[in-house]
Amino acid sequence: MQRQCDIITAQQLTDHIHAITLDAGDIGLAARPGQFVHVKCGDGVLLRRPISICDCREGYLKIVFEARGPGTQWLGEKKSGELDILGPLGRGFDLAGRNVLLVGGGIGVPPLLYAAREVIGIATAILGFRSADHVILQSHFREICKRVTITTDDGSFGEQGFVTGPLEHHLKQGGYDSILACGPTPMLQAVAALADTYNIHCQVSLEERMACGVGACLGCAIETNDGQMLRVCKDGPVFSATEVF
């Protein structure tokens, strides 16, 4: 669906990360955790920008994004009015499981908030950031999850190190049914390796450059372990870790 959606709130969370809440109507009502929306970012930017859905309730849809280039910088400066939204797009997370581990890194953290809210069982979150001034959404996760662990590369907030440290600690304790992960590719590869070691089902959300966002142009195609070519925008962005790592 393509809609003109009213901006309800616009916030700057860090120097480069912004949050916008939209009255997305039927797009919001149809959305599922792990899906994304394709956002038109001004008249001078040809391609839409794919942005994961951070949260969604009663048709109000929240996106959190990093201002990197002209498109997302324009979006970060947009404080009111409407946005041209296409969505919801992609395949989201399978939320089944009595005890679910959510593992996020950097700008991969936001889509896990929606998943945490909608999981069938108990959610535990492990969230990694570069430093204290990059930490986002921690209070929101603490409202929803049974346990939240924050790591930073430099130790300026939470535990020092990568998410794989506390993740392995949790996996050794046992009792978890699945892992949902989103973040940089090296992090996802490390999480997938631990999931394999401890025989835990793991789903990963991938990020690729996209053009159409609906599976037509094949610009975001990736090769799976069995040689298939799958489109991140349509067949994903969520995949079983064993498919892609």
Image (cartoon, grey):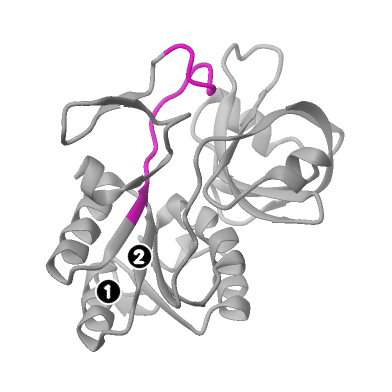
Residue at image coords 69%, 50% = 62
Q: What residue sits right under mark 2 in the picture? A: 179
**Horizontal arrangement in the rendering, residue 75 relative to residue 36 (left or right):** right
User: What residue type is disc 2 on?
Assistant: Ile
State yes or no: discs 1 and 2 in contact (Cβ < 8 Å). yes
Does the magenta run of residues contain 196? no
Q: Residues within 10 Å of mark 2 (few under 14, many from 20)?
A: many
Identify the magenta region. 203-217
Q: Quadrant of residue 103?
A: bottom left
Q: What residue sits right under mark 1 in the picture? A: 167
Q: Is residue 51 above or below residue 167?
A: above
Q: Quadrant of residue 24?
A: top right
Residue at image coords 30%, 59% = 202
Q: Quadrant of residue 47?
A: top right
Which of these two is toward me, 230 or 129? 230
Say what secondary structure mark 2 lies in. Answer: strand
Residue at image coords 42%, 72% = 100
Which of these two is toward me, 129 or 126? 126
Q: Residues within 10 Å of mark 1 (few under 14, many from 20)?
A: many
Which one is earlier in the sequence, the residue at label 1 or at label 2? 1
Residue 93 in the image: state x and y as whole percent. Answer: 48, 52
The answer to whether one can see residue 126 in this image is no
